[in-house]
Structures are given as C-alpha cells and as structure tokens.
Image (tube, rainbow, N blue to C red):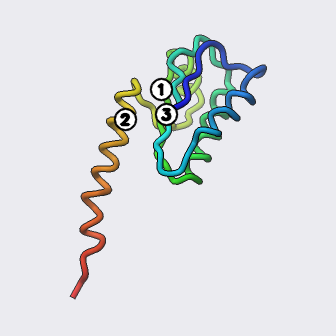
Amino acid sequence: MVTVDGVIDDTNIDRVTALARRFVLAEKPFILDLSGVTSAAAQVISLCYDIDESCYHADVSWAVIGSDAVRRVLNTSGASFPLAESVPDAMHQFHESLDQRRRLLPLLTKKTA
C-alpha cells in the first residue's frame, strides 16, 4: 500500500509515480491510498494508468482510494479504475475476488470423461 497526502501536480507526479510503482509486488494486491490528497491535477490519471499497467504485468489486483479532489479528476476523465471507499473496503474486494477464484478452481480442474 502506498499513501499519498497533499497535492499531486506536475511538480511531483514523476516522483509519486516512481514511488508507487516500486511497491507493486507479485502476489500482493496493491492499494493506492489517495484519500489525503487535497488537490489533484489531471496527471493523477496518468498515475492511475501507470499503476494499472504495473499491476497487470505483476498479475495483481489493485484499488485506488480517492479523495473528493481525486475522484473529480477521475470522473471527468471517463477512465475506469478500481475504486474503493477505504482500505478495509479495498481489502474486502480483494478477498471476495480471491474467494471467487477458489470456487472456480475445482470446476476448472475437474476431469471430463
């Protein structure tokens, strides 16, 4: 999980993105907690795309928790990212997804006669 507070803009987006990407690890769901962001420029969209790509390549689920400022930017972009209301909500989403996969696994491994 990476937590970012304050302002995200063109002066710090590269550092924020690099920091967040370092914590995307294989086999570990990733949470980008932006609930403390007070001001978000349009660059927050590229941050989310970069994290989405990193998580795709690491084959992990992820979620972003956005403040009102972040959600406004994301909503106006038309982009679709996995949003969660809180860290516990994101964790609940990850556990539900894992449970669904576990229920499907026996069906996929059954031998057909």
In the rendered structure, which disc, 3 or 2, sits on the residue that comes first in sequence?
3
Q: What is the three-letter code of the residue carrying label 2? A: Met
Image marks 1 and 3: residues in contact by CB distance under 8 Å? yes
Under tag 2, what secondary structure?
Answer: helix
Q: Amino acid at mark 3?
A: Ile
Relative image position of residue 38 (x, y in whole percent): 58, 11
Residue highlighted by disc 1: 65
Q: Kindly report the distance in space between the C-alpha atoms of the residues bearing marks 3 and 2.
A: 9 Å
Q: Is residue 10 left or right of residue 80?
A: right
Residue occupying image coordinates x 45% and y 32%? 83
For mark 3, what is the residue? 31
Amino acid type of the residue that numbered disc 1 sits on in the rendered structure: Ile
Tag of residue 32:
none
Instruction: Say which residue label 2 marks.
Output: 91
Residue furthest out toward the right: 11
SS at mark 1?
A: strand
